[in-house]
Image (cartoon, helix red, strand yellow):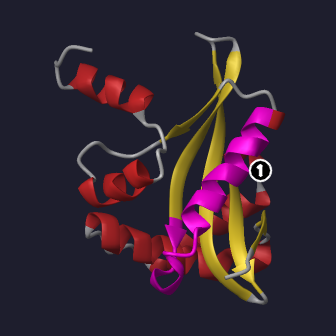
Amino acid sequence: MNFEIRPATTGDAETIAQFNIEMALESENLRLEPGKVRRGVEKSLSDPSMGRFYIAYQGDEILGQIRVTQEWSDWNDAEYWWIQNVYVVPSARKQGIYKALHHHVKNLAEAAGACRLQLYVDAENVAAQAVYKKLNMTQSNYLIFEQREDGADR
């Protein structure tokens, strides 16, 4: 399958909102309110400081999306990039799109001088973690903070 990756635009908001609704239902069994999700996506697309979406597409069909945010780390005097979510339509999941999206944002983060690209996923979200583990996406820093909250050792 041939596909390309580009930054999402406000014209992609409806599809990205639908992807987020499907992702929440599939990975966390959450039913999100479509209007609220659409408004959140539109805000994010109109203000890059809230994060950036990148989409994988073929022709005029969007096959997947990834959202990243940036955060300044005072501990490391450098910027961290966080993968907030990534979704690929079920019919395109074995086409290398997950890896391509991850690779794309990893290259962008490195080019921007970010010290790390981290995955932001709840430790209890087993469905999402299974996907991310296959792709070798790191989440170690986030899990350390969760373990501290749970009273576990590092």
The verdict on residue 106 being magenta is: yes
Residue 117 lies left or right of residue 135; in this view the side is right
| Nearer to us in this view, 102 or 145 | 102
Q: Residue furthest bottom?
A: 60
The verdict on residue 17 being magenta is: no
Residue 107 lies left or right of residue 23; in this view the side is right
- Look at mark 1 in the image and give the residue it sits on: 48
State the predominant SS element of the stretch in magenta: helix
SS for callout 1: helix
Decide: few, some or many residues near mark 1? Use Cα within 10 Å; few <14, some 14-19, many ≥20. Answer: few
| Nearer to us in this view, 86 or 13 | 86
| Nearer to us in this view, 131 or 77 | 131
Residue 28: image quadrant is bottom left
Q: Which residues are magenta?
A: 87-110
Q: Position of residue 69 (x, y in %)?
A: 64, 43
Quadrant of image for the N terminus:
bottom right
Examine the rendering and report whether any part of residue 51 can be seen. Answer: no
Q: Position of residue 104 (x, y in %)?
A: 72, 53
Q: Is residue 45 above or below residue 23?
A: above
Q: Position of residue 43 (x, y in %)?
A: 68, 61
Give amino acid for label 1: Pro
Residue 49: image quadrant is top right
Q: Is residue 122 above or below residue 6?
A: above
Residue drawn at 32 percent across, 75 percent down:
31
Residue drawn at 77 percent across, 53 percent down:
47
Residue drawn at 73 percent across, 38 percent down:
109
